[in-house]
Image (cartoon, rainbow, N blue to C red):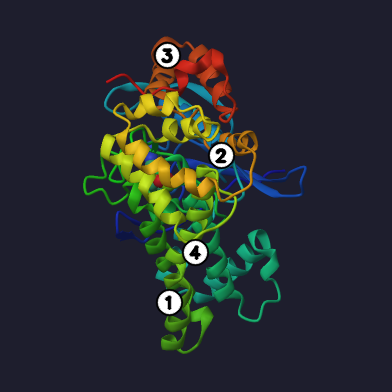
Amino acid sequence: GAVPLVQAYAGHQFGGFSPQLGDGRALLLGEVIDRNGQRRDIQLKGSGPTPFSRSGDGRAALGPVLREYLIGEAMHALGIPTTRALAAVMTGESVYRENPLPGAVLTRVAASHIRVGTFELFAARGDHAKVRRLADYVIERHYRELQGHSTPYLALLASVCDRQAALIAKWMHVGFIHGVMNTDNMAISGETIDYGPCAFMDHYDPATVFSSIDRSGRYAYANQPKIAQWNLARLAETLLPLIDTDNDDAIGRASEVVTAFPEQYERYWLKGMRAKLGLVSEEDTDIDIATGFLTALQGKKLDFTLAFRYLADAALGQEERIRALFGDALAYDLWSDHWRSRLSRESVAPLVRAQAMRRVNPAFIPRNHRVEGALSAAVERADYAPFERLLNILALPFDDQPEFAAFTQPAPE
Ligand code: AMP
Ligand code: MG
């Protein structure tokens, strides 16, 4: 009884507008209502050509399919909204890239596949009635609390901004770099979607880029909040005729919402950073403690994930690992004087604090060399044991799992 379909969308890719993209290698099988009453899309990716394939073959190679599977599941375990992998199957066919590669299909589950680019498709055609239908549908599916709102489309824009601010802050807290934050890869639901050349940062450097096609660093780690805001401005433009019949008034009201994004993001970011640093109260200078730590990491090119994880030990007075990470620990000592005096103004038992820090500072992230190792074993040797093992480790990112201590470490030089 399913009615499979492919979705049309448009999108800004690396800043340039493409009026017609769409599911070129994906097929929406249908929707199901899950045990929590939530409607979910079930979609195949890599299932073959569609009317939107253009010159592409509509297929996917096993490596990227397993990569999306692994990283999406890791993100979910880290508590970050994301589409999820339900299955990965091989097709038995070869797909031709630079070399022939084994073909595969990912089955993914999403709150929906509606993107900023879906709004752009109808807006670019000047079909405001369809933008309105889409906006009403999105409110009913993802933002029910806005039903009956006096200015629903402005409120929708504000709510999408809010979910994106929360999402991007979570990415930043674990060092995740999406890599292709085009407007067609930004989901209206607030889930992370379309894992391509994404990766987790190892040593802390705000300019980190992993995607080889991102030559200007548009989608670098530190640019992600700014790019999210840029994308949301594109969404705002599509909603203008719905917000007010007077275009200038509409622009004024939408701009106000989009301009508030950096502050909104900063609030989420700082809240998460306080938790990472073990703080339960709020003081004005907390931002300096947070940026002070990051500056110290950057100066010494220290591993982002390990540094925060080891800070939980330091909260218990066990500073061996963080000192060893810093090597010459002067930079750490200078910073930790401020941190300690800040901690001393809170009455939290050290063990309680350290446990809370371990619940937000993961021991395990999908380290690039581990991901590559698991994928090449699967693709080149049909050996899925490393993939399964890594998937299991990443399912419990906040547990110590001492038998897998080696998986907490960055790649050797
Ligand atoms: P992405 O970079 O994966 O977000 O994809 C951007 C656009 O290219 C989307 O419209 C995809 O459907 C399309 N696309 C990517 N790979 C293929 C392929 N192998 N065959 C057809 N279309 C593709
Ligand atoms: Mg995409």
> In this rendering, is residue 247 above or below 155?
below
> In this rendering, is residue 82 above or below 61?
below
Q: Name the residue under label 4.
A: 264
Q: Residue 114 at what x, y percent from top left?
A: 54, 55
Helix, strand or loop at label 3? It is helix
Q: Is residue 204 visible?
A: no
| Figure quadrant, ligand 1 | top left
Helix, strand or loop at label 2? It is loop
Report the front residue among 230 and 124: 230
Q: Quadrant of residue 126?
A: bottom left
Report the front residue among 337 and 233: 337
Q: Residue 201 at what x, y percent from top left?
A: 37, 36
Q: Earlier in the sequence, mark 3 or mark 4?
A: 4
Helix, strand or loop at label 1? It is helix
**Amino acid tagged 3:** Ala
Q: Which of marks 3 and 4 is in front?
A: 4
Q: Name the residue under label 1.
A: 255
Can you say which quadrant of the picture contains the N terminus? top right
Q: Which of marks 1 and 2 is in front?
A: 2
Q: Earlier in the sequence, mark 2 or mark 4?
A: 4
